[in-house]
Amino acid sequence: MEVSGRKPERSFKDSVGRSSAEDGEVFCQPCSSDGDWMVAMGYCENCNEYLCATCLKVHRRQAVSRNHKVLEGENMPKARMSSVTLNACSELCAKHTNEIVKFYCSAHDVVGCGDCMVLDHKSCKVDRIQDISMNYHNGAEHQELQQKVDQFLQNIEQVKRQIQTNDKHIQQTYITAVNCVKAFKKEILEYLDKAEADMLAELNKRKRSDEKMISDLKEHEKTMRKNIQELHEKLQLQLNHANELFAAAKEMKERITHIGDSIKQLQQDCQFRQYEFVCSKQVKEMVASQFKLGELLVKKHIVEMEPKFDSEIGIKASDDTEDCEIFACALISYNRIILADYSNKCLKIVDIENRNIAEKYKLQSGSRGLAVITKNRFAVALPDEQKIQFLTLTQCDKITESNAINVKGRCEKIACQNNKIMVLYPDRVVILNMDGKETKTICNSNVKWQMDIAHDSKSFYVSNSSLRKSVFRFDFEGNLIATYKDKDLSDVRGLCVTRDGTVLVCNCEDNGSVHMISPECKKIKEILKQNDHVSRPCCVSFCDETNILFLCNNSSTLDSKLRNVINIFQFK
């Protein structure tokens, strides 16, 4: 049996009882329970416990343990005693603190000292603990208790992991919210900057117009002044010559009338009308209201909501020769989703907002698998060509070819995680870097690797539609973490993992549905059962920003109305 008094590893589970440290030293068990690693100097046979010098000294002083048999130095056992001893019980009675617990009342299922039995259990059948303890030790009740405690340890480990996960989510939620506030503020400032620029542009335009008007008035005034000055000088020259003055006055009569009219017009043009800036009534009211940028709303967990059919988008293009066969779909953004149409040998980018096909890209062969790497880069599996083709999406929703990597065999399904490509074969999963070099091969003889693959940050899931009809969860070292099976899951197909770790699994039946399971592969609930828009569901995607689920049906026996659309369900 392992020595619980020796230095353990750091996890909670291991601190309850582990083997010795590498150097073989035995440590004091009371001290180690508090995280202090003191070398054991003695061993109490009655307590079956290792003690350091300090604890040993206290142990010998206490009335309850001063007569215990203690082994020191070389006489200490090298390992904790595995045999069950029948030494007298040393537990003190909770009611009579000077007495030791020695008896058991089966009628009331309690233990106590002699005083307890005399006072409270006179008419009961009482046993001595040392007479019945061996049977208990080897009995079912002890085993059940041990199993419960072990289960408690597992449960508390799960709680610890959940707390750690929640802590990460809290930090991430805070960072995301702060970024959203700053982004919204930036959006407002950009809007205000543009509004200010537009207003200043209008002011500058008005200023240039007014300045041109002043310039024209100045020129007109200058010309008029010149003409009037000429008349004045001519009249002054003829002032002492009556005949010439009369003739000149009559000649300039028409000119005088024209100058008078021009001065009146000039006086009217000089009536300048001032203007002032009046701020927007809406903006002024908004500022006066001391509005908040927004509010913090508690986002519902996906399991707390139910999907309601929203709409469908036609995905059959005018030049398609066959009905659509969609075996893979993936979100590029909240308003763009990419589909792999196997029968028409193409990729289709669907504009969710405008409800149409934004781009169609022809392939040399049909594809059943694709993976989004970034918002403008993705990869598509081409099993007939035994390669993975990388593609780039331009700002105009145009798809262009990038590089390609060759693979060993027909790869039907792929997924991308941290610049790694996971390739699903019938007998294994191979992890490649972006250059196509294999970094890990994961095999399991008990699993048929087929149908679909999805992932979260620490693990990946594969679906299996053979006799097992299961979903398997693996870590990236190839260890099987959990398995999901359900009697209502008859044909496993598409997989999708939401941001919070919930897994969505298509049940590809005539009256199909979607199973919602936890990261521990426990069933949460089944959704979209007996839905008119769901029959033979084959692939699924979920948008965490909008809480929208996208679903494609696929079967040669389906009505074309169900095959040639992507269905949109809003979670509320």
Image: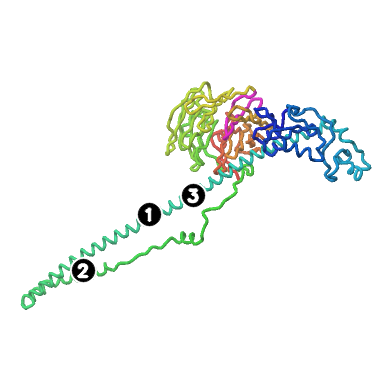
| Residue type at numbered disc 3 | Lys
Residue 62 versus residue 449 in the image, above or below = below
In space, the residues marked 2 and 3 are separated at their CA atoms by 61 Å
Q: Which mark is residue 182?
A: 3
Q: Nearer the viewer, residue 118 or 218?
A: 118
Which quadrant is the N terminus positioned in? Answer: top right
Helix, strand or loop at disc 1?
A: helix
Q: Which residue is mark 1?
A: 197
Q: Nearer the viewer, residue 73 or 123?
A: 73
Q: Nearer the viewer, residue 532 or 471?
A: 471
Which dot, 1 or 2, sits closer to the camera? 1
- Magenta span contains residue 546: no
Query: Dot 2, crowdedness within 10 Å: few (<14), some or many (≥20)?
Result: some
| Residue type at numbered disc 1 | Ala
Q: Which residue is mark 2?
A: 262
Which dot, 2 or 3, sits closer to the camera? 3
**Percent position of residue 153, x then y:** 71, 36
Query: Dot 3, crowdedness within 10 Å: few (<14), some or many (≥20)?
Result: few
Q: Please report the bounds of the magenta region as a residue range.
A: 446-469
Residue 476, located in which quarter of the rendered image? top right
Which dot, 3 or 1, sits closer to the camera? 3
- In the shown orientation, is residue 324 left or right of residue 244? right
**Percent position of residue 398, x then y:** 43, 35
Residue 212 versus residue 115 in the image, above or below = below
Mark closest to the chain's N terminus, 3 or 1: 3
Mark closest to the chain's N terminus, 2 or 3: 3
Q: Are marks 1 and 2 in contact (CB under 8 Å)?
A: no
Helix, strand or loop at disc 3?
A: helix
